[in-house]
């Protein structure tokens, strides 16, 4: 196997691996989104409608509940943003690739090199998008944990208050 063919194969592997990373991140985002929605739903169901704002426990319960909803709401929005797959690069559309590489002036080695460069450029673009998606998802996870703990504290405060 010639050197250029090995390079082309490795570039294709890198490109495909980045596509797999995107799929894993989207799947994780969907799981976060589902979990957050369920937690918010349960939190809404157990909210006490007769909050007594006159005492400190009632005010504490209300404030903790609002904070919990805000944190989990932001986490929900961030997980939804990280599900989006806009801007990802794949193969050129139409006949661009063929039109550019079928000329007799382009040798086999040059064509393979051009395809390898295309793979690496697309991989780099997709990697930047995946890195951004991973950062958003990590922040969403942190907010989810803090929001969930706040919800548990709110539940405990509410159970002692009512």
Image (cartoon, rainbow, N blue to C red):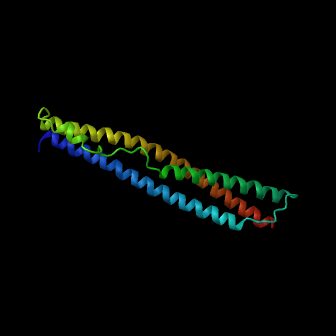
Q: Residue at x 47, y 50 (%)?
A: 84
Residue 88: percent from the left, percent from the top? 39, 45
Q: Is residue 39 left or right of residue 3?
A: right
Q: Residue at x 32, y 46 (%)?
A: 90
Residue 119: percent from the left, percent from the top? 28, 42
Position of the N terminus, as image quadrant, is: top left
Residue 7: percent from the left, percent from the top? 20, 41
User: Relative to 12, is 150 above or below?
Assistant: below
As drawn, the residue found furthest toward the right would be 54
Q: Residue 100 falls in which quadrant of the image?
A: top left
Q: Is residue 59 left or right of residue 95?
A: right
Q: Is residue 131 left or right of residue 38?
A: left
- The number of callouts visible is 0
Q: Residue at x 52, y 49 (%)?
A: 81
Position of the C terminus, as image quadrant, is: bottom right
- Front residue (pair 111, 102): 102
User: Relative to 100, is 143 above or below?
Assistant: below
- Front residue (pair 56, 27): 27
């Amino acid at each position: 196997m010639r050197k250029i063919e090995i390079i082309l194969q490795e570039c294709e592997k890198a490109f495909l691996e980045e596509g797999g990373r995107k799929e894993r991140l989207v799947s994780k985002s969907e799981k976060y989104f589902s979990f957050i929605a369920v937690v918010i739903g349960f939190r809404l169901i157990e909210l006490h409608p007769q909050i007594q704002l006159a005492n400190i426990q009632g005010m504490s319960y209300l404030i903790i509940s609002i904070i919990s909803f805000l944190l989990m709401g932001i986490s929900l929005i961030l997980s939804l943003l990280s599900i989006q797959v806009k801007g990802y690069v794949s193969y050129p559309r139409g006949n661009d690739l063929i039109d550019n590489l079928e000329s007799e002036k382009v040798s086999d080695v040059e064509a393979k090199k051009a395809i390898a460069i295309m793979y690496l450029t697309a991989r780099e673009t997709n990697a930047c998008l995946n890195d951004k998606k991973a950062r958003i998802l990590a922040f969403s996870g942190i907010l989810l944990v803090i929001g969930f703990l706040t919800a548990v504290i709110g539940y405990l405060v509410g159970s002692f208050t009512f």
